Amino acid sequence: MMGTALVTGCAGFIGSHLCERLLDEGERVIGVDVFTANYPRWIKQRNLAAVAGRPGFTLLEQSLLEADLRPLLQQVDVVYHQAALPGVRTSWGQSFGDYVSHNILATQRLLEAAREVPVRRLVCASSSSVYGGMTGPVGEDGPLRPISPYGVTKLSAEQLCQLYALQFGLSVVCLRYFTVFGPRQRPDMAIHRFIRAVLHRQPLTVYGDGEQTRDFTLIHDAVTANLLAAQAPGARGVYNIGYGGSCFPKDVRALIRLGQEHGLVLDLLQKVEQVNQTQVEWCMSKFAGRLGGLSGRRIALLGLTFKPHTDDIREAPSLRVIQMLLQEGALVSAFDPKGATHVQSLYPAVRCAATPYEAAAGADAVLLLTEWPQIIGLDWQALRQVVQGNVLLDARNALQPEAIRRAGFQYMGVGRGVAEDGGGGMGHERRGALCRPGNPATAFLVFAAKDTAACGKPAGA
């Protein structure tokens, strides 16, 4: 036996898989859950069947709002807090009080008990709903704008965790899940509906224009993320749990080759690779059209790395953007806190500047390629004073369009539609933001998900 873990929400989709994995690895597990009307009892009973009766597993059918948590936590090393009241649509109206109780008050009671015992670490399940209506990929430092009461309660639970970590030194890690799927998933979720329709040769119900994309995470990877969050000595803060990472493009190519070796045509993965390859060209053609051509134009690039908080430029869209700009005769300047040296060694013609304002000086247009906090937080009115032109392409959809327009720029987003003043997006096609392929919120539907729990960066790191 290695230790004892407490899993709240143990009869849920993720919680039951987590209990099963912990038991497989020799842990003792205390599972806490309660049967409520919002989650069909038969589903929870089915989920518990995977662990019920196994040596080392104890089930406590209690609500976190009523349980005596302090003596319970004295028995455990790690708490995996998976319990929550799910659902975006049902969180509106009179139901909001239930969401506050289950998602905020229950979390606060657990944190109070954990800091008084204390436990070695508390891993708290959060949600991508804290980001709200995402139109492009977001990192952990991205803007938090929940657009549902459910998202508000999950963000509040996160902030409580960070508060207890700051004030009492409690070791807490929050994991933001991006559409977890797999066995024992609730049958009303999208993946089940799609597969059920395919198996029964029924038409798929498509909402909107059918071009919206989403990151999907295999349940095995979500569970692995929890274990890593509990075990890694330096883990702290908030992590996105999704399919993304710079490993994505090469892994897709490897899977396609593996299929070919076995005589399989993996149409889905080939489409993923095709879109990833054409996205940059599509964006740049729109950009060039807005400028009336690129030859002789001075273009300032803000951000060069694959994602913020790294010097990794492998698979970075900036490399193809630079190639296209130079081939078209553009003059390129750039700023990146960590990746500039690497890029300049590859493209000596690129003038790398020490500040964003220096990079943008005299530019005909500005292209935001990486959502570094120091770029997102720029004084855009001050930047407007140093540029020659006024076109700004936000290829990450990381900025607030109205704020950029007020600063005097013609704002171009990706897939945001055309604004009334003509300075909006790149048409009504629902394109994802300039692809960091597979990153949370813009990855294309891929079932062969890869564990990326250790690839993320904690907020504020």
Image (spheres, helix red, strand yellow):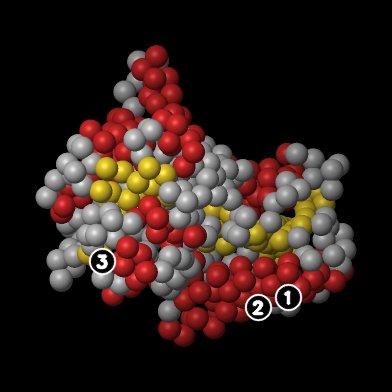
In percent of the image, x 30 and y 72: which residue is there?
A: 407
Tag 3 residue? 409
Residue 218 in view, yes or no? no
Instruction: Work out whether 304 lies above or below 421.
Output: above
Q: Are marks 1 and 3 in contact (CB under 8 Å)?
A: no
Instruction: Work out whether 251 lies above or below 104.
Output: above
The location of residue 19, given as percent across then percent down, is: 69, 49
Sequence order check, earlier mark of 1 and 3: 1
The location of residue 334, given as percent across then percent down, is: 38, 47
Which element is circle 1 on? Answer: helix
Instruction: Work out whether 34 lies above or below 26.
Output: below
Sequence order check, earlier mark of 3 and 2: 2
**Could you tell me the amino acid type at mark 2?**
Leu
**As rendered, which of 314 and 125 lies closer to the eye?**
314
In percent of the image, x 55 and y 70: which residue is there?
A: 155
> How many residues crowd around disc 2 within 10 Å: few (fewer than 14), some, or many (20 or more)?
some
Which element is circle 3 on? Answer: loop
Gap between marks 3 and 2 measured at Cα? 44 Å
In percent of the image, x 66 and y 73: which residue is there?
A: 160
Gap between marks 1 and 3 measured at Cα? 48 Å
Q: Which mark is residue 105?
A: 2
**Could you tell me the amino acid type at mark 1?**
Arg
Furthest-bottom residue in view?
Answer: 94
**As rendered, which of 298 and 280 lies closer to the eye?**
298
